[in-house]
Image: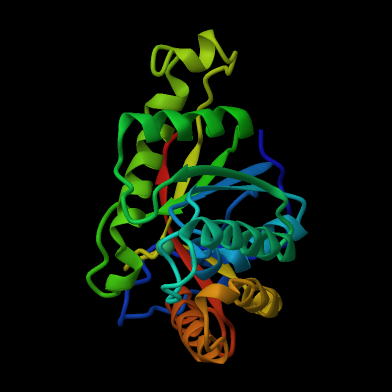
Amino acid sequence: MVAQVTGSTVCTVGHAARGNVDRMPDDQMVHDELPERVLVITAHPDDVDFGAAGSVATWTDAGVEVSYCIVTDGDAGGSDREMPRRVMAEIRREEQATAAKLVGVTDLYWLGYADGRVEPTLELRRDLSRVIRMVRPQRVVTQSPDRNYQRIYASHPDHLAAGEAALCAVYPDARNPFAHTELLDVEGLEPWSVAEVWLMAMPAPDRFVDITDVADRKMDALRSHVSQHPDPAALDGLIQGWGAMIAELAGFPEGRVAEGFLRVDTA
Ligand SMILES: [Zn+2]
């Protein structure tokens, strides 16, 4: 069941392509229905804020319940060699919780895997299946399991692994009562089918969210990761540039900023 929200800023552009932008008139944009619940799965604290915090703010403003599941505590982040990694993990959880709140998210799941060592194991697939069965989202937003050669920093090995495990959890694990049987038999978590997955940082997105009106909140969320950004001002130009580029791909009017995703139908 999905809630229809009119005036949604989410749109589909059928054949937008990098470097060859067809400006699509409004009536050719297909307005997606907003889901009731969205689960964002990422490898590290701050990943969601780079790729999707603007969209998340737009969705929570429209009444969508958004939850985050973060695979690691980001304990390999930062540049302070004196800081114990356990302390860094605590700091990064707090920073992510602060950032989440700024875009309307208070429901966070931490899996506690080691930063820099994520693999798409059966154990991780089970842990993600557990969260999917608990949250019961219609849409999962996650990282691409495919390396983006146009933007290599988006393709940290942990991101690829988290994305792969998330897709495996969406299909087939979370919906299959005979996968990870302890989830149903011991924990009583019924199978759940996620209808669609939106992948972040894809070279050719086909779903676009106009985040112009919430861009300040996205920047505030990003700046919440204080331990990771010694020069927060440097982020502004980078994020603005990405947002403008994606808005152009989407065919949005000049001056708008957007986030883009590739939709995978998993219904
Ligand atoms: Zn990351």
Q: Residue at x 65, y 60 (%)?
A: 94
**Going by the picture, which residue comes out furthest to the top?**
185
Residue 34 location (% of width, % of height): 65, 49
Residue 26 location (% of width, % of height): 58, 71
Residue 247 location (% of width, % of height): 50, 78
Query: If the image is split into quadrants, where does the N terminus sit?
Result: top right
Q: Is residue 15 left or right of residue 40?
A: left
State how the image is colored.
Answer: rainbow
Q: Quadrant of ligand 1?
A: bottom left
| Above or below 197: residue 253 | below
| Count of marks, rendered view | 0
One can see residue 171 in this view:
no
Q: Is residue 78 left or right of residue 216?
A: left
One can see residue 81 in this view:
yes
Residue 227 location (% of width, % of height): 55, 74
Q: Residue at x 27, y 66 (%)?
A: 148
Quarter of image, res 147: bottom left
